[in-house]
Image (tube, rainbow, N blue to C red):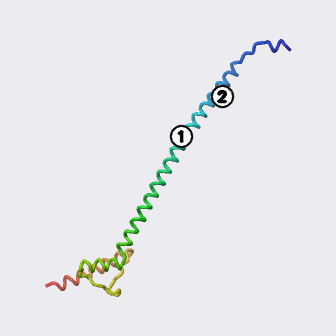
Amino acid sequence: MNKHRNKERRFSIAEIVVLILAAAVLMVGGVTHAWLKNSHVDVMRDVDQTERRIKDHEDAINSLQVKIDKKLNIYQLRDDLERAKSSLVLVPVSAIEVIHAHQPGKVQAQVSQQTTSIAQTRP
């Protein structure tokens, strides 16, 4: 029994090759893991930046919507026109003609009829 214990142990070529391959696989795995973690951090940074930009755009849209609503306030418009002593007058609702955008042929026909009637009235 002491004979085996005192005997110097040497590694075979196959064992050394297996150890080298295992070390190489572990190194490649570690480098790949670090690279993937860095990529993940970069992607998360980009996502955060994009979310901030979306939030900023939403705030800008809300701000513009408030400005539009203030400018289109009917009472404010009337007051502004009165202060400017504008010659604009109220138009009855029955005088408003609705033109639908999905019927361009109908609009073109109306325009050509109006143009013809205008040309006939000119001397």
The kind of residue tagged 2 is Ala
Foreground mark, 1 or 2, reads 1
Quadrant for the C terminus, please. bottom left
> x, y (%) of residue 113?
27, 82
Circle 1: element type: helix
Quick one: label 1 or label 2, which is nearer the N terminus?
Answer: 2
Residue under circle 2? 22
Residue at coordinates 50% horizontally, 51% vertically from top-left?
A: 48
> x, y (%) of residue 69?
39, 72
Which image quadrant is residue 65 in? Answer: bottom left
* The furthest residue to the right: 1
Residue at coordinates 64% horizontally, 27% vertically from top-left?
A: 23
Quadrant for the N terminus, please. top right
Number of residues whose C-alpha sits closer than 10 Å to that of mark 2, classed few (under 14), some (14–19) or many (20 or more): few
Residue at coordinates 35% horizontally, 79% vertically from top-left?
A: 75
Side of 72 relative to 44 (left or right):
left
> x, y (%) of residue 83?
26, 78
The residue nearer to you, when weighing 55 against 93, is 55
Which image quadrant is residue 63 in? Answer: bottom left
The residue nearer to you, when weighing 75 against 106, is 75
Residue under circle 1? 38
Side of 96 relative to 3 (left or right):
left
The residue nearer to you, when weighing 93 against 61, is 61
Side of 61 relative to 23 (left or right):
left
